[in-house]
Image: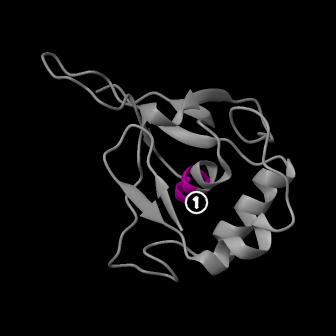
Amino acid sequence: MRFVMPHYPCDFEIPDDWLGAISSRTPPPAGAGYHPSAPATLVPLADIQPPRRDRAFPLEWHGMERHRFVRVLEWMVGGNGIEPVPLLAVPPLDGCNQLYPFVVYDGLHRFYASIVAGFDHLPAEIHQPAKR
């Protein structure tokens, strides 16, 4: 099944068999983002640069692991607490139009599962870049 990326001119695909068992037994989620297991800031998915799924490292599907993705998606739609995604705040550059103020530091499966689950925000732990 194909899913549209928020604020990005493309879509992505998740194999139908990964979604089959979940969609048949769980209600749609409520709320802007999944239930975080720790204090988190809700960040619109449209403000986060989509993490790159490295096709050279395919795992089971273009850089994603089936078991991990399905487990995360089940937890999200089931209302279980999941760790917030660490995001790196990208400082604006002078004279540049910055499309995304945040980058996923670790959380590729949680990012894509949030879109699949129908959320429009991501619970995040925001980190500032190190000063030089």
The percent position of residue 104, horizontal first and vertical second, equals 47, 45
- Tell me the residue at 63%/28% (across/down): 42
The percent position of residue 26, horizontal first and vertical second, equals 85, 59
- Looking at the rendered structure, the number of numbered marks drawn on it comes to 1
132 sits to left or right of 15: left
The percent position of residue 60, horizontal first and vertical second, equals 52, 83
The percent position of residue 61, horizontal first and vertical second, equals 49, 78
Q: What residue type is labelled 1?
A: His
Image quarter of the C terminus: top left
Query: 101 and 26: which one is in front?
Result: 26
Query: 17 and 76: which one is in front?
Result: 17
81 sits to left or right of 16: right
Q: Residues within 10 Å of mark 1 (few under 14, many from 20)?
A: many
Question: Looking at the picture, does residue 44 appear above or below residue 60?
Answer: above
Query: 39 and 71: which one is in front?
Result: 71
> What is the secondary structure assignment of the residue under circle 1?
helix
* Main SS, magenta residues: helix
Image quarter of the N terminus: bottom right
Residue assigned mark 1: 109
- Tell me the residue at 65%/75% (across/down): 18
Write down the region rendered in magenta: 107-112
